[in-house]
Image (cartoon, rainbow, N blue to C red):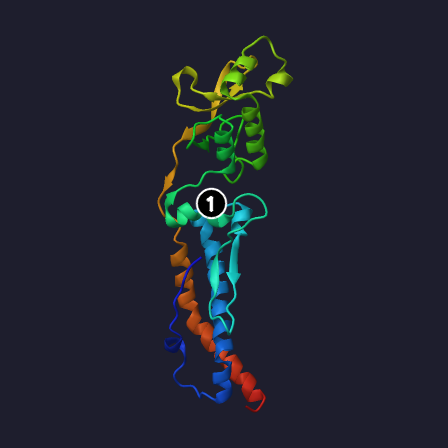
């Protein structure tokens, strides 16, 4: 969300007849103008999101909100929602892009650490290779994360290796145990998938890294304040004209 300070006096038309009725209704006029500018700011934020977020999902695009101003509270808020029915809210996972800093651990990373599969403080980054291809948004689906987690947590690194390297396994059984954590062939620590008819080959499906650090690359504050400042004057004049026309029609 963004904070915008507004000098109302500088935005009001100078050549105007201030009747008692118009003065009384001024808080309503200002609230209406602020709300209209906030709506325009939301539209601008949504339109600009794909420029700064690579392949944003529909969930991200639909996570903007507007909190309307009221005569008793001349504040209007625009931003990304801080709650979600399932998963992580957009405001949280976009925060590193908006304000910079460290990425928060995902629930999948916390589960892997708590189960002892990964060392404490580890983060995972999907590589997008077979068999875990990224979707159209450049992400892995929640079902895929759940599938990998269940297999890794069920067997762990040492237990899994002992089970999979025993005797012959049927393809159906191997397919349920095709992920492991380790450093095969001296490679960096990662999550790997066994491939091939005999499960002798493997692909790196997740890199294991330290906590990712981000620079602020999504200028949400600039987008919102710029749009608000550019529209509030016109919206305020329009709201005043409508109110004056309404009062004139009623003989005030």
Does residue 139 appear in the picture of this structure? no
Identified at 44% across, 41% down, the residue is 104
Q: Position of residue 139 (x, y in %)?
A: 51, 37
Q: Vertical placement of 126 versus 166: above or below? A: below
Identified at 41% across, 55% down, the residue is 220
The residue carrying mark 1 is 93
Q: Is residue 94 left or right of residue 164?
A: left
Choose top left, top right, bottom left or bottom right for residue 178. Answer: top right
| Front-most of residues 227 and 82 | 82
Identified at 46% across, 58% down, the residue is 44
Give the number of callouts: 1
Does residue 21 appear in the picture of this structure? yes
Q: Position of residue 227 (x, y in %)?
A: 42, 63
Q: Position of residue 169 (x, y in %)?
A: 61, 12
Q: Is residue 117 left or right of residue 175?
A: left
Q: Residue furthest top?
A: 167
Q: Is residue 8 left or right of residue 141?
A: left
Choose top left, top right, bottom left or bottom right for residue 226. Answer: bottom left
Q: Residue furthest bottom?
A: 251
Look at the image and tell me in which quarter the C terminus lies.
Answer: bottom right
SS at badge 1? helix
Q: Vertical placement of 242 versus 64: above or below? A: below
- Label 1 packing within 10 angstroms: few (<14), some (14-19), many (20+): some
């Amino acid at each position: 969300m963004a904070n915008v300070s507004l000098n109302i006096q500088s935005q009001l038309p100078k050549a105007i007849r201030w009747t008692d009725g118009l003065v009384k209704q001024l808080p309503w006029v200002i609230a209406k103008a602020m709300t209209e500018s906030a709506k325009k700011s939301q539209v601008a934020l949504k339109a600009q999101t794909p420029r700064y977020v690579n392949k944003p999902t529909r969930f991200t695009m639909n996570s903007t909100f507007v909190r309307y101003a009221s005569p008793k509270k001349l504040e209007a808020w625009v931003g990304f929602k801080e709650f979600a029915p399932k998963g992580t809210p957009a405001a949280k996972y976009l925060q590193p892009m908006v304000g910079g800093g460290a990425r928060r651990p995902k629930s999948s990373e916390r589960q892997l650490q708590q189960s002892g599969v990964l060392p404490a403080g580890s983060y995972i980054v999907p590589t997008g290779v077979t068999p875990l291809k990224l979707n159209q948004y450049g992400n892995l689906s929640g079902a895929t994360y759940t599938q990998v987690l269940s297999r890794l947590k069920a067997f762990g690194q040492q237990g899994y290796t002992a089970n999979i390297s025993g005797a012959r396994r049927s393809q159906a059984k191997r397919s349920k145990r095709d992920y492991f954590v380790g450093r095969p062939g001296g490679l960096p620590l990662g999550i790997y998938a066994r491939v091939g008819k005999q499960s002798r080959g493997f692909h790196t499906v997740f890199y294991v890294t330290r906590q990712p650090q981000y620079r602020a690359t999504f200028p949400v504050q600039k987008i919102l304040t710029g749009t608000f400042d550019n529209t509030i004057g016109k919206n305020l004049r329009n709201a005043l004209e409508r109110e004056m026309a309404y009062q004139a029609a009623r003989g005030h």
